[in-house]
Amino acid sequence: MRRFICIVSSLTLILNLVQAQDNNLNNDSSGTVFHWPDGKKMALSLSFDDARYSQVDKGIPLLNRYHVSGTFYVSPGAMIERVKDWENAVGAGHEIGNHTLVHPCSGNFPWARDKALEEYTLEKMAKELDSASVLIHEVLGIWPSAFAYSCGQTFVGRGVDTKSYVPLVVERFETGRNWMNEGPNDPVYCDLARLNGTELDGKSFQEALQLIKETRNQGAWLIFAGHEMNEGGQQTSLLPTIDSICRYASDPSNGIWIDNVTNIGKYVREMRESPDHTPMKP
Ligand SMILES: [Zn+2]
């Protein structure tokens, strides 16, 4: 009998713990008010990496037609081959972000073996981030405040010596964007130094629209991330998809604030620090 009472009280304890966790989750996910500006229901950013030529040749002229400001995380080596075009992009209101200097990634990619994050130290990464910003400043006259992790990887070293370089990003930039993440960013909770980036490459407009609608239902911030901006091919965000996204997001009845990563990130930061941003009373 004593054993039976013991089991029952253990089960009651477990049930209470599970219930307490559920309550916490409810509070976290819906207990805080967050308003996007002008009554918008969600935020959307279009971001593209590596300074691919198709971005300045085809993608940026398309965004310009809709007056949509994108965020371009440039690889300086490719950028300096098209300086005039990138100057024009800045002039048209696009954001230029830092994407490291030589695009280090895990050496598990054979092409990255000579610039493997496993062989990096934090000191080496800090110097690389600063060198890339200085180069962007020298060429385009602006200091980047947005950063995208090359290959979406946020570490240096390997095994027990692995270290996160996210703190280096926090010291230098307003935001850091990841790659190939599931889901949009919750403006109440997301870490601005590790923002989710959702792959746009290869998606049809219908696939993109599904993600946009899910984001709007959550009142969240979707950051699309892509590479080439063209009609087709590897790692390519399709021009017809981008065109349809811009048209859809430009229709005020769809309730979308479309802007670059820094503008939306700044708003999120300011709203969190605002006294009006208080937990919702049930
Ligand atoms: Zn990249």
Image: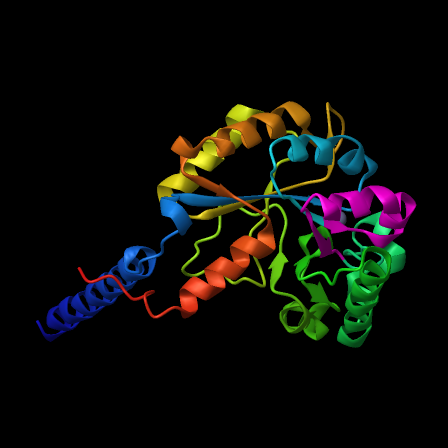
Please provide percent x and percent y for residue 113.
Answer: 87, 55
Residue 118, can we see it? yes
The quadrant of the picture occupied by the C terminus is bottom left
State how the image is colored.
Answer: rainbow
For the point 67% across and 62% down, the residue is 145
Please provide percent x and percent y for residue 134.
Answer: 82, 66
Horizontal relation, residue 227 to residue 30: left or right: right
Q: Which quadrant holds residue 17?
A: bottom left
Foreground: 110 or 150? 150
For this orientation, the residue located farthest to the left is 1
Foreground: 271 or 212? 271
Any magenta on residue 190? no
Foreground: 119 or 232? 232
Please provide percent x and percent y for residue 242.
Answer: 62, 30
Residue 219, can we see it? no
Question: Which stretch appears magenta?
Answer: 73-99
